[in-house]
Image: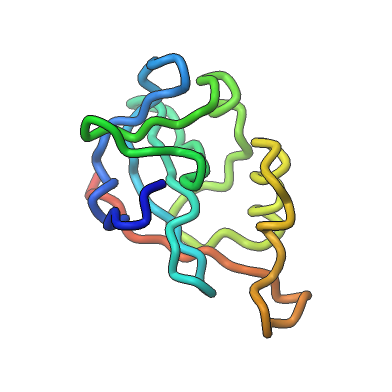
Amino acid sequence: MQPDIDPRSLIGRKAFDKNGTKIGTVDEVYLDDATGEPEWAAVRTGLFSRDAFVPLRPSELADETLRVPYDRRLIKDAPDFGVGRHLSPEQELQLYHHYRLDISSADPAPGRCGDEGREFGRIAGSPD
């Protein structure tokens, strides 16, 4: 994702998969506690559905929408952790595996205990 994008500006934007199919609306953005960088977005996939976590690093903001380079089915099958709290290092690792992302970028931040891992805080989403 472009580094100059304010993560709060993503909330409420429509999200589309690699084929241009709408997958939902960005509900929350999760920041890496160690770096402050936006890492994940929780996308509300339907009115009575759930939020699916999508990685922001390979995604891009285009035409006021979030373009996620994965197929809708893969996104909808992502692990469901609920929203509103930190992602644990174990949850993050599950997401990295699900999206087949480079796990080396999921390693703990320098200077932190390896058992701590990284945690991901959230930027509160739009009110329900």
On the image, the x and y values in percent for residue 48 come to 38, 27
Q: Quadrant of the C terminus?
A: top left
On the image, the x and y values in percent for residue 89 come to 67, 62
Seen in the picture, residue 60 relative to 82 is either above or below; the reply is above
The quarter of the displayed image where residue 37 is located: bottom left
Seen in the picture, residue 92 relative to 55 is either above or below; the reply is below
Name the image colouring.
rainbow
Q: Residue at x 35, y 30 (%)?
A: 15
Residue farthest bottom in this picture: 111
Q: Is residue 115 left or right of residue 87?
A: right
On the image, the x and y values in percent for residue 81 come to 57, 47
Q: Residue at x 73, y 57 (%)?
A: 104
The quarter of the displayed image where residue 42 is located: top left
Q: Residue at x 54, y 74 (%)?
A: 34
Residue farthest right in this picture: 115
Q: Is residue 33 left or right of residue 2?
A: right
